[in-house]
Every structure is written in C-alpha cells, then in structure tokens.
Amino acid sequence: MSSYTQEDRLFKIDTPLGKDALLLQGFRGTEGISRLFHFELDLLSENSAISFSDIIGKNVTVSLKRADGSYRYINGFISRFAQTAMEETLTAYEAEMVPWLWFLTRNANCRIFQNKTVPDIITQVFDDLGFNSYSNSLQGTYHPRVYCVQYRESDFNFVSRLMEEYGIFYFFKHEQGNHTLVLADAPSAHATCPGQSSLRYVSVAGTRYEEDVVTSWRTEQELRTGKYSHTDYNFTTPSTSLQVSEPTVYTAGGNDKYETYDYPGRYLAKDRGENLAKVRMQEEEAGHYIANGTSDARALISGYKFTLKEHYRSDENADYVLTEIHHAGRSEAYGTSKGLSTDSYSNNFACIPLSVPFRPVRKTPRPVVEGVQPAIVVGPKGEEIYTDQYGRVKVQFYWDRVGKKDENSSCWVRVSQVWAGKNWGTMFIPRIGQEVIVDFVEGDPDRPMITGRVYNAEQMPPGTLPDRQNVSGLRTRSTKNGGEHDANVLAFDDTKGEEVFYMHAQKDRGARVENDDKLIVGNNQSITIHNNRTEVVEEGDETVTIKKGNRLVSVDMGNDTHTIKQGNRSVEINMGNDSLRIKMGNQDVKLDLGQSTTEAMQSITLKVGQSSIVLDQMGVTIKGMMISIEGQIQTQVKAIMTQINGSAMLQMQGGITMIN
C-alpha cells in the first residue's frame, strides 16, 4: 500500500496498478469537437520499477474535484509511458492519455464498403476493432453510398474524412472508468456542462472566488465567403446539370459577392448536392464568430454548452458550445504538508454561439491513387461474361482481402472503349478472369474506370511470342465453354514479302454494303464452299469480264441450271472458239415458244458416228449409212438442178408416181 494518498488533492488518477500506485502531480491536455483529446500526465510513484506493459494501453481515469465536491472525470487510455527521474523517495514518470478512438490511428487498411450509409460504415469500423463505447445522436438522413473505399489510410483518417465530408462531428462523454464517443450533426446534441450550466464573467484576474468563473473573454468575427457552389457529373443523366449553390445566412462586409465554387462535389443527384452544399456553407460559417476565454471551471467539456453571464457587453451574454479546451493542473509536491489549497487548475477555451451549427473542417486528406492499378474481372460463378446495360463490369483489386472474386467484389465499373457514340462505336466487354487496367477519376478510389486490358502468365496472348511477333490482330473466344480453337479471328501478318490479312468466322459471317462493293485482287483468288452458294441480284446487271485468260466452271457431280424467268440470254465470243462436250448423257434444246436460229459464217456440222450434216456456203451435205426423209403429208425437194443417183439401185415408190 502506498504511503501517499490523492484523496485530499484537487485532482487524482485511478489506474489498474492499484490505489495511489501512481500519483498525479500535474497534467496538460487538449480536447475539442471532432478531435482526439490528448493529455500529458506527470506522475510519481514509490515503485521505481513499474512494468511498462502493465500500464501501456490500459484504461485510466483522471478526476477533477469541482467546487461542490463532486468530480469531473477525464477517462482514457495510456498510449505512452516513460520513466524520467528519481525525486527523493519517489520516481517520476510521464504518460500520455488518449481516447479509444486514438487506437484507430494504429490500424490502416484497404477495403471496400458497398451500399452502406456513412454512419453504418463508421460504426462498422468501430465494431471490427471491438470498440462499442459510442452513441448515435444523428438527426439527418443518410443515404447508402453505393461504393466507398478505404485505401491505404488509417481507420481514424478514414472515418474522420467521412464525418468531415458529411458534416458529422463527435465529442466524448466521460465517466469513471469509461468514456463514450457521441456522433452528432445538430445543435440538439449539445448537452449542458454537468454541474455548470452557466459561468459568470469577472474582469479581475488572479482573485480567488467561491465559484468557478470566466476571467477573460475575447471575441472575434471573420469575413467568410458568402456562397458555396459545386457541381458534379452523372453519366446516367449526362445532360442534367447538377450545379447547386447555398448562400450564407451570416452576411457581413459585402461577403455576399464572394463565392467558393468546387468540382467534383462527390454526388450523383441534385438533392444530394444541395444537402452537401448546405454542410459546406455551415462548415464555413462555423468559424465566422469565435470566443476565447480563460477560466478555472473544471466542469467544462468540449461538445457541451454553457451560458455566459454578467459580461459588460450584454449581447455576449448568450449560450455557447465549447469547441476546444486546453487544460492545465499542478499539485504541490507530495511529501510536503501543503494540501488542497496549493493545487491549481486553469483552462483556456474556444466556443461558438449555440445558434451557429458546428461542422468539422475538412482537414483529413483524401487518399489519391497515383496512377493506374491492375484488377481482375469477376462475376457470378459459372458465368464467363457479366455486364449491365452500359457495358460495365465488376472487378476485384489485388489489394482486396475481403472480396470473394464474385459479383459482389466491387461496384459496376465503366469500361473505356476505342470509340463510343450514340448507338455506335466499338464494344469489347472484358470477360471474367481477364486482367484490366483501372484508372480513377481525379485519383479518387471511389470512382474507378477501366481504361485498358493486359495479359498475364495465366491469360497469355494468342500465338507464340516472340516467334510470331510480326502478327497482330484480334482473336475472340466462343462462349460459353469455348475451346482454344473456338474463335473469330482478324489477323495481320506483317512479315515483309509474306504479308497476310486473315479473317476467320467460327460459324457464320454476314456482311452488308449499303451502296457499292469493290474488290481488287492483285493476283489469284480462290473461294471454296463446302455446301451451297446463292447469289441474288435483285435489280440490275451482273457482268463477268475476263480480260485475258480462261474461265472454267466445273461441276464434279450435280447439275448446272440457268433460269431466265424473263429476258434474253446472249453469249458473245469476239475471237476464239465455243466448245460444249458431254462425255456421258444427253443434250436437249427445247423452245416452248419462239424460234431457234443457228448461223455460221463458214459452216455448221452435225455429226453422229459416220453420219453427218454439213451446212456451208456452198450448200448442205447429208451423209450417212442410211438416210431417211419422211414427210407425213408432203415432202418437196426443189432446185434448179436436182440429181438422184443410186449406184446400185434406185427405187421410187408411191401410190401414184408422177415423173415430170
């Protein structure tokens, strides 16, 4: 048991080391709204060998005795502990006391929150670290954020910047053995200082009073901007202006002609922008009128309110919210006979009128992604492509330790295309498993955008490199369950002297030319069709011109049919021969209606075996083993001279035979 006691002192400390194991000789500290309180404690102990691990990270309570004998508590955790010197029979120690929220400065992370409100995100961060000493006094409406990223920042910086962005402030409620963080966004959250609803102002400093008083009071007003405006962009409503403005309610010195305009406002709907603009304007207004004072009132707590009384300027006698307090206390050296009357305490404080809503200043830097990042495209199990109506995809970043590489790993991420117009342009949707390059709008991790795709060791490029380094082009993959060779291909081989433009359609190919189609082949053209081919000229002509060379049409098995439903057929050979040969089969020429004319300048020969008919300019010669001419009604042979000669026998026979 200690030989010393703190019971008769103005302030004392309770620690896990036991009653009066540490004696509080003095302290200095600062607390404020939306800031970590920090107290430096001067301690004494009869134990010169305190184990630091027994006190580091442990909860302690500093108690300040008020004028009425009750205590005002300051509770916190020891973040630093030092042994400094030996003073007679006591060893001197120093310690720093901080809130539990300070521990968030010792934890940094990269993670993603989706479809959660800012208060829910903040409390999840608290809960994940096992801290539950907080209360929610928020009055505003907070819509879920589709996508919110904590990126390479401490948990404290992350929750701080979120609160600063949305105008949420916090302060601490202290009690013996515990302190509670209060989340708030409205003046109604400011309770009256316990046991000190009002403070009297006195102008004579250094005089002791029976009550706690304010001994100095200084006020100042600053000209601030008169309007806050900002805008943003939502690609789903690209033609809609999101610009909004919020004027100040505190006009002074012509500040209504000054405006702060910013972009981006970090919102996607105009009503959200209006709410944020109001918060930004209130952030500016919160510091336009500040009072600074000095007092010995131990009941003052940041985030709480009090009423100033008996100031010589009557309009200063009003309700104020304490925004910052600097505490200092010192006790007479232990081991002397002097007691409570020699202990001292004082504070300096800042406050604003209760009528002015407090908003935290946006001082916490936002994380900026420097450059681009790789990510993998993800989606539901069993799918190969996962997209929405805008061609967006989901990704998982390589720093994400929580994502399951599924459709919940990220928000929908827009994909940059080579060309993008209104229902025209290019469209290549990154597929699940592919690696993409992600950029961020103004470096904001909350606003990713895919700007490229890259190969990796698991997603290798088509072809063998560097062997086929001269070949470039495009190769797709059939889906679902397409194999290595299931692809549409467009390839360019730039090997000098062996250049090739190659196109492959895995199944069907369609092409439509709205006007003219022109093809020039510098050498040979070969077309192989494994099934049917149909060409339709709906209106107009077809012309095939062979300027030099031959034309060969070969039907290995099947028919060759030419049908002219209406019109003429003309074959013209300016120079050369026309030959038709049927090795096996028949030839029929039939005119259902009309005439047939065959004309030759020299001769026409019809020949079957040894029989022939020759038509030339001199006449017609018919030869054959047997020649039969039969006219069913009449046969007439007429000429200037007609000769009938039977070298063996001539037989003429008729029912009536008339000669001459």
Image (cartoon, rainbow, N blue to C red):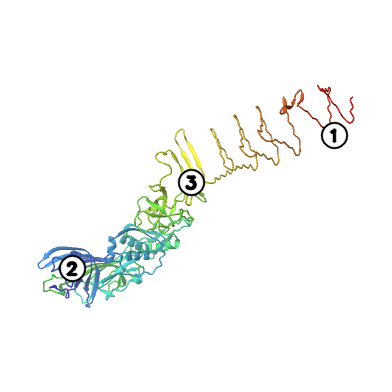
**Which quarter of the rendered picture does the C terminus lie within?**
top right
Instruction: Give the answer, above or below, for where 69 lies relative to 255.
Output: below
Residue 434 lies, in percent from the top left, at 42, 50
For image coordinates 52% across by 44% down, the residue present is 505
Helix, strand or loop status at disc 3: loop
Instruction: Answer above or below: position of 272 versus 417.
Output: below
Report the residue marked by disc 2: 26
Q: What amino acid is at disc 1?
A: Ile
Q: Where does residue 4 sit, x and y in percent of width and height?
A: 13, 73
Asked where in the image residue 20 lies, by quadrant, the reply is bottom left
The answer for how far apart the CA atoms under marks 1 and 2 are is: 151 Å
Residue that badge 3 annotates: 487
Compare marks 3 and 2 and give the one earlier in the sequence. Answer: 2
Of residue 14 and residue 571, the one placed in the foreground of this image is 571
Q: Residue furthest bottom?
A: 68
Structural distance between the alpha carbons of marks 1 and 3: 75 Å
Between 651 and 345, the residue placed more toward the observer is 651
Q: Which residue is mark 1?
A: 633
| Label 3 Cα crowd, 10 Å radius (few <14 / some 14-19 / many 20+) | some
Q: Amino acid at mark 3?
A: Ala
